[in-house]
Amino acid sequence: MFNNSGLSLNQAPPIEVVLRLFFVGSIFGIVLSVMLFFWHTNLTDISAPQTLAIVHTFTLGVMASFMLGALFQMMPVLCGVHIKAPIDLGIRVYVVLSIGVIFLITAFINGATSLYIFASIFLGYALLISAYVMIKRLLTIKHSNSSRGMLLALIALSITAILGIILLFLRAGFNLPFDYLAIKTIHYNFGLFGWIALLIISVAFQVVEMFYVTPKYNERYAKYITIVLFSLLLIYAFMRYLDLAIAIIIPYILAIIVGINAIITIIKFKQKKRPVNDASIFFWIIGMVFLVLCSLSFLFNLSITITAEFFAFFALSIVFAMSYKIIPFLVWFHLNALGYFDAPMMHEVVAPKYAKANLWIYLASILSLILSNWLPIIFYIGSFLLLISFCMLSLAIYRAWDKYSYTLVYGKKFNFN
Amino acid sequence: MREFFLDARELEHPLPLELAIDKLKQLDNNSYFYMLHRKEPIPLLALASEHNLNFISEQKDDGYWHILISPNQELLLDNLIKD
């Protein structure tokens, strides 16, 4: 019975916490597109400063902002977990994270020791404080398959952040007793498989069925897959650091697992019980297709650039999918919860046609970026279309906030009783 | 006593919540809202609680949730649950 669960609307995250992080993420998406437009010729060298700047604008500026925003939203809803002082924490996270990303980009380009130190302080604070607060709360609950995966993804985020800080200190010239290459490999495996992929997989167990009325994932599969993924990452970290040759097998096993999981999710979408055809479902399917392609590309040793592109398109597609579901819902729900009779309906917050237009532009952008591997001139079109996609997303977030604020000032309240 | 019924068992999130709130706005002391759902609709129940509505939610053996909400505090919603 709900009466015993102790949940309340007061525990739902304030709308501004989520929208601010999403807005920051979309602005970094614009920055990312501009960087791609001007620096794409350097991308084949994965250690080049411009490549590192682009990769971290994507993983930290875009992905971390959206994923932390989504966690603020989903933890109370999916896990029944209440985050204390969410507005204060949210502001600290998005301000400090943004400053940290700017320091990091500048550090990669400029190479100054002080910039690396500032970047590690700001990013370390933003990521570790978020992870600490969320992990602490998640350790107190009885876990569902999603919440367990979210907990493991947050632990992976902490490990990624700590290793990242060590790498920044090494790049800054500090003489620390660590093997740079080993730490770097473990850092990006935990970041990509442990934080990004594991979180998306865990959240999918609940939201795919809930949003699109698909059959449920097999209970035992959903329970163990996240534990297996995380355990493999830990084993890999130890083996790689001890320089055991067998460690090289584990990323291949991880790629097979995430690829199979993506195929299972695509099958779930095909089995959906109702003809849901909004933009978000297509973003989800595109994301899963690119995760399969990424796994295949990795397994068959295609170019690292193409594999990385496929992974990025998987992750970005889910960002767009979740944003176009969460943003209108948040505005509509918060206004109704506050009792506004004339709160805009969800389709009035973000028009389905607008989201579909964003879908087509985004699809054109990623296809252009893939084609540009063989026809480089198309890269300019691809990065420009990506820029338009992120501009559209940031505009959707801004308009949603504007409608929310307008209703707060001019809306009429109703009373249920 | 007038019943506003919603079978949300095969509706995608957040359509059940959107339709439910629309029904709640039509309730008076002589009516109640009855919803069937595949999950316990926590945000809806939280909203009912915040607005001091009389409500219950109960999961039956078939796994579906029966949710009843009314502004009438005297109404014994338990008695209105269908098998």
Image (cartoon, rainbow, N blue to C red):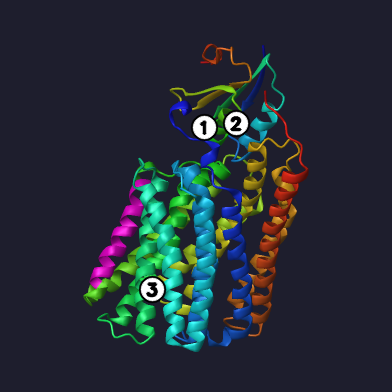
Q: Position of residue A222 (x, y in %)?
A: 38, 47
| Other-residue count near label 2 (Cα within 10 Å), few / some / many at <14 / 14–19 / ≥20 | some
Q: Quadrant of residue B3?
A: top right
Of residue A203 and residue A260, the one placed in the foreground of this image is A203
Q: Which residue is mark 1?
A: B38
Q: Given the image, on which type of amino acid does mark 2 rest?
A: Ala
Residue drawn 34% across and 72% down?
Answer: A163
State whether discs 3 and 2 lie on one chain. Answer: no
Helix, strand or loop under label 3: helix
Tag of residue A43: none
Tell me where the magenta segment starts and ends, as one range.
Answer: A221-239
| Chain of the residue displaying label 2 | B
In this rendering, would A175 be left or right of B64? left
* Circles 1 and 2: CB atoms closer than 8 Å: yes
| Chain of the residue displaying label 1 | B
Q: Main secondary structure of the magenta part?
A: helix
Q: CA distance from mark 1 to mark 2?
A: 7 Å
Q: Which residue is mark 2?
A: B8
Q: Which residue is mark 3?
A: A164
Q: CA distance from mark 3 to mark 2?
A: 46 Å
